[in-house]
Amino acid sequence: MLDRRHSFVAGLVAALSLGVAFAAPTAPAKKEASKSKEAAPAGVAAELNGILIAENAEQKVKKVAPPIEDLGFLRRVTIDLIGRIPTEQEMQEFMSLPASSRRSQTIEKLLADVRFSDRWTVFYADMLRVRSGSEGGSALMAFLHESLEASLPYDEMCRRMIRANGKAGYIPEVGFILGDEADPMALAGATSQTFLGIRIACAQCHNHPFDKWTREEFYGLAAYFGMTRRVERRFKNNLYGVYTTEADEMKVLWPPEGAAPTNERHAMKPTFPFELEQESGSHIARLVSLRSDQEQARKAASNKDDGPSLDDLLAAAEQNAKKQVDGDEEADAVLGEAKKDVRSIELQAEMFRKSELRSELAELITSPRNRFFSRALVNRVWAELVGRGFVDPLDDFSD
C-alpha cells in the first residue's frame, strides 16, 4: 500500500478487481461482516465478497454478470483513481504483468500517482459542497488537496473543518462553516447529511415525517453551532476580511419562534441525537493500532533537526544588525517593527475564539463508536466506483 490512508479506496477497488458480481441491494445487507482482523485490501475484498455472495443467495439471484476482462478493468480503475484513460504504453505494461497480480499491482501504482490527489479532491469537494467562489471556498479546496497529499486521516480532516474558527483564507478549514454563512440551522442539516448520511433537516420545521428525528433533536444539534458568528471587517465601506469566532450568547432558542411567547424561550442545550455504540468492536482495536503506528512515525519525524526556531532567527537577525549597523537608530527601528509584526500573528489569532461546542461535536461525529460516520464514507466511495451505493440515495441512512 502507498499508505493506510488509502485503505478504504484500495479495499473497495480490490473487491471489484476480483470480478465478483452482485445484485443492486434494495436495503443494507443483513449479514454481518466477519470479525477478521485483516485490514489489508485483500482482506477487505474477501469480506465484501462474502457479504455480496450471501446477499445474492438471500435474494435468490441465479444469474450474475461475469468478471470484467483485463483491459476493461484497467480503463475503469484508471479513470476512477486518477481521472483519465490509460495510455497505450500503460496498457502494454499492464498486460506484461503476471495475470494473477496485474490488477493489484496496478491499483498500488495508481494510488501512488500524483493525479490521485487531484481526482479525489474533486470527490471530496463535491461531497462537501465546496464553492470556489464563496468566502474561503478556494482555500478549503486547497486544504482538501493538501490533506490527500499529506495522508491526513479522514476523521482528522473532518474534525478540523467542523471545529475551525478564524479568518477566511488564513485558516482554510473555516471555509466549511462559511459555506453556510455560519448559520446554525443550515449547518446542522449539512453536517448531518454530509458526514453521517442522515437527512435530519426536515425536522427543522416539524417532526420528521418519514424518520424518527424530532424537531427538538434538530434544534439540539443546531445548538452546537449556536454561538458561532460570521464577522466582517470593513474599512471605508470596503470589505477586507471575514472570519468566524464564538459569541457569549446562544443563538438557537427553544421552543421555536412562534411556538411560545418570546419571554418563555430559552437557550437550547446542545444535544447529539445519534446513538453511539457502547461496546468496543474490532474496528476500534484496528484504529487504535493504526493511530499508535502513526504517532510513532510522527515522533520519529519530529526528532529530526527541523532547523532554527523563529526566536532563534530573530535573535540571530538582531545580532547581525548590531554588528553591521552599530548605533544605527533607523535599523534598530526597522528590526523592532519586524519583531512586533511577527509577534502580532499570535495575538491576532486570539480574536478567533475557539469553539468548545463544535470541538465536542467534531469528536462525537468522528468517533469510531459512531458507525454512521464510517458507513457514510464507505457508501459514498462505493457509489463513486460502482455507480450505486449500498444505501441509495447516498445520504439517506435510516432504520
Image (cartoon, helix red, strand yellow):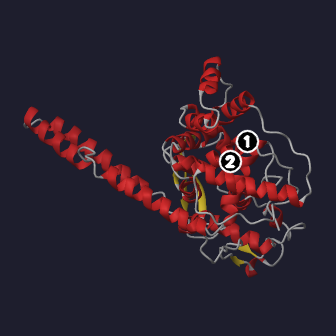
Percent across and percent down for residue 110 are 59, 34
Q: Residue furthest top?
A: 88
Amino acid type indicated by mark 2: Leu
Q: Give the percent coordinates (x, y) of residue 239.
A: 56, 41
Q: Quadrant of residue 193?
A: bottom right
Q: Earlier in the sequence, mark 2 or mark 1?
A: 2
Q: Which residue is mark 2?
A: 12
Asked whether 16 or 147 is in front, the reply is: 16
Q: Is residue 306 above or below residue 100?
A: below
User: What element does badge 2 sit on?
Assistant: helix
State the residue at coordinates (83%, 39%). Answer: 66
Q: Residue 376 appears at what percent x and percent y?
A: 71, 57
Q: Are marks 2 and 1 in contact (CB under 8 Å)?
A: yes
Question: Can residue 156 be spotted in the picture?
Answer: yes
* Secondary element at tag 1: helix
Q: Is residue 49 left or right of residue 364?
A: right
Real-space Cα separation, disc 2 to disc 1, in angstroms: 8 Å
Which residue sits at x=64%, y=33%? 99
Query: In front of the other: label 2 or label 1?
Result: 2
Circle 1 residue: 385
Judged from this view, the residue extending furthest toward the bottom is 264
Residue 108 position (above or below residue 253): above
| Numbered-mark total | 2
Please identify the quadrant where the C terminus is shown: bottom right
